[in-house]
């Protein structure tokens, strides 16, 4: 017997830029939106019947049409409105909307920050993912591509050794990572998502900067606990932390000592540490 297994479809990488014109002072909202639908779409696969298939072009048009009225606050609220709209189709059992917001910052000038000129910032990307179904909404938010470094307070020692191990132990290393963190909310009623994002970002950076790190694994645990201690509405935090290695350069062929100052950065291969820190019970 042959049967159709799980299936879904949607529109990926919908681009949207909205300029909020508050008098002479403008704000740029720059989003990439993905929409995925799951539900009663079997006939489209097995019978070539598209009667239940919401066109992906319609999804793109809906994102653009909703931007004027509904993109007035957090990306979480915008994603919620979009997800609930597509869930209203009878054949849709689950609608998922993922949004990445790309940062533009005001251009500095001799007279101060410009009202209507901007620089694209690549320091991080804010994200959210809203999954709507008859059981309610699951809201996840996050930050990705945040590159951070510790030049002190980082070590890696006490690991097992075998005949293939050449890495020396160290109590003073340079640690850098391209951080992705995703946190899942429990009860979202009354949550100010913009304020929550700012405070969680501050908690992550404070924890990273202020703790002594015996490993990237320990850093993920310490940073995750900092978020959960700060925000009771957050149920879990998931981390992806590639270890961006910086290898100490041997300067002895040049008659020089390297006092932990000169490094060669590498991007591949890299260690990849992933962890979830969550509330028990």
Image (spheres, rainbow, N blue to C red):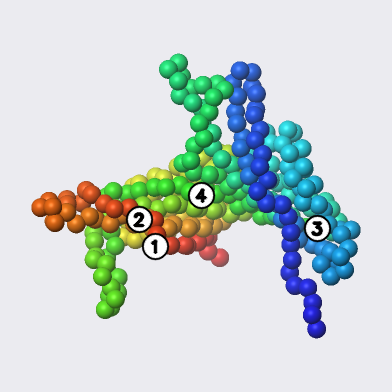
Residue 82 vertical placement versus 23 (above, below): below
Return the residue found at the far left.
255
Q: Residue at x 60, y 45 (%)?
A: 100
Label 4 vs 1, first from the N-terminus: 4
Q: Please name the residue that numbered disc 3 is placed on.
A: 92
User: How far is the residue under mark 3 from the one under mark 4?
Assistant: 30 Å
Q: Please name the residue that numbered disc 4 is placed on.
A: 144
User: How far is the residue under mark 2 from the one under mark 1?
Assistant: 8 Å
Q: Position of residue 3 (x, y in %)?
A: 79, 77
Label 3 vs 2, first from the N-terminus: 3
Quarter of the view holding residue 30: top right
Label 4 vs 2, first from the N-terminus: 4
Q: Residue at x 17, y 50 (%)?
A: 259
Q: Please name the residue that numbered disc 1 is placed on.
A: 269
Residue 191 vertical placement versus 173 (above, below): above
Q: Residue at x 59, y 21 (%)?
A: 25
Return the residue found at the far bottom.
1
């Amino acid at each position: 017997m042959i049967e159709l297994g799980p299936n879904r479809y949607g529109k990926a990488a919908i681009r949207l830029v909205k300029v909020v014109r508050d008098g002479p002072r403008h704000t740029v909202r720059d989003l990439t939106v993905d929409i995925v639908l799951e539900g009663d779409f079997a006939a489209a696969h097995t019978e070539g019947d598209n009667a239940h298939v919401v066109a992906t072009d319609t999804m793109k048009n809906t994102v653009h049409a909703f931007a004027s009225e509904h993109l007035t606050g957090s990306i979480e609220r915008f994603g919620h409105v979009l997800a609930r709209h597509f869930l209203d189709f009878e054949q849709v059992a689950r609608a998922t909307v993922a949004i990445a917001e790309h940062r533009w910052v005001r251009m500095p000038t001799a007279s101060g920050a410009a009202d209507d000129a901007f620089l694209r910032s690549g320091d991080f990307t804010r994200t959210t993912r809203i999954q709507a179904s008859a059981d309610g909404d699951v809201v996840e938010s996050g930050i990705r591509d945040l590159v951070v470094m510790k030049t002190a307070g980082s070590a890696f020692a006490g690991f097992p050794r075998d005949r293939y191990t050449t890495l020396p132990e160290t109590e003073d290393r340079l640690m850098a990572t391209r951080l992705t963190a995703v946190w899942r909310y429990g009860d979202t009623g009354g949550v100010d998502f913009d304020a929550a994002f700012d405070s969680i970002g501050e908690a992550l950076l404070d924890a990273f900067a202020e703790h002594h790190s015996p490993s990237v694994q320990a850093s993920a645990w310490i940073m995750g606990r900092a978020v959960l201690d700060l925000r009771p509405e957050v149920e879990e935090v998931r981390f992806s932390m590639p270890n961006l290695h910086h290898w100490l350069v041997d300067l002895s062929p040049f008659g020089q000592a390297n006092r932990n100052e000169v490094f060669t950065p590498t991007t591949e291969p890299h260690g990849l540490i992933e962890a979830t820190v969550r509330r028990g019970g």
